[in-house]
Amino acid sequence: MALIRWQPFQEIETIRRQMDQMFDDLAGVNREYTTTWTPAIELEDTEDNLILRAEIPGIEGKDLDIQVARESVSIAGETRHESKTQERGYLRSEFRYGNFQRTIPLPVPIKNDQVQAEFKNGILNLTLPKAEEAKKRVVKINLEDGKTSLPGSETVQVV
């Protein structure tokens, strides 16, 4: 009869891997083939517009689907895999292929029917004009008539 040495840390690691696999199966995740990618963005707030820039390298403009709502912008697209056959050796590829989508919530409402777009060198530029109620308005308050409070605000004395 052969004696087998007990290795508790190896068994714990096996249990950990089995639990990770179980949770991945429940969530529908396949670790080997899942790649999540969303384009990086910059959002600039100017006086009259929001300027949204998205970095989308390796994709042509015709493969992009851009939807602009009053409160958000959704960018979706697909990078297609080029089929290559190799007779010898192997192919190592770190390129991302497949569909992507990103929805960007906007801080203020915009006029979505007046959006201007430009796509050049893998950079998408969207100029999103702000709605009139979202623009900052300056109001001058006149305190020369002797009043010390603003209209609509009453002073309450607590006894």
Image (spheres, rainbow, N blue to C red):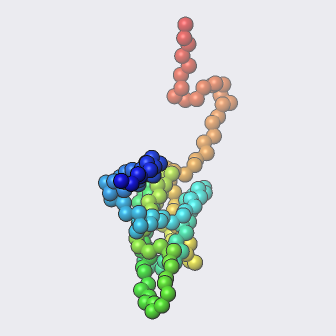
Q: Farthest left residue? A: 26
Q: Is residue 47 above or below residue 8?
A: below
Name the foreground residue: 10 vs 54: 10
Q: Farthest bottom residue? A: 87
Q: Which of the 4 image quarters holds residue 79? A: bottom left
Say left or right for 7 vs 46.
left
At 58% from the left edge and 29% from the top edge, which residue is drawn?
150
Say left or right for 45 vs 17.
right
Q: Total marks drawn?
A: 0
Q: Is residue 122 above or below residue 89?
A: above
Q: Is residue 80 visible?
A: yes
Question: Residue 6, image x and y in percent?
Answer: 43, 48
Quadrant of the frame with the C terminus: top right
Q: Is residue 112 visible?
A: no
Q: Which of the 4 image quarters holds residue 48? A: bottom right
Question: Residue 65, image x and y in percent?
Answer: 41, 71
Name the foreground residue: 87 vs 108: 87
Name the foreground residue: 15 vs 108: 15
Q: Is residue 42 above or below residue 138?
A: below
At 54% from the left edge and 16% from the top edge, which residue is drawn?
156
Q: Farthest right residue? A: 144
Question: Residue 46, image x and y in percent?
Answer: 60, 57
Question: Residue 17, image x and y in percent?
Answer: 41, 54
Q: Which of the 4 image quarters holds residue 43? A: bottom right
At 68% from the left edge and 30% from the top edge, which residue is drawn?
144
Name the foreground residue: 10 vs 130: 10
At 49% from the left edge and 82% from the top edge, which residue is drawn?
91
Q: Farthest front residue? A: 1
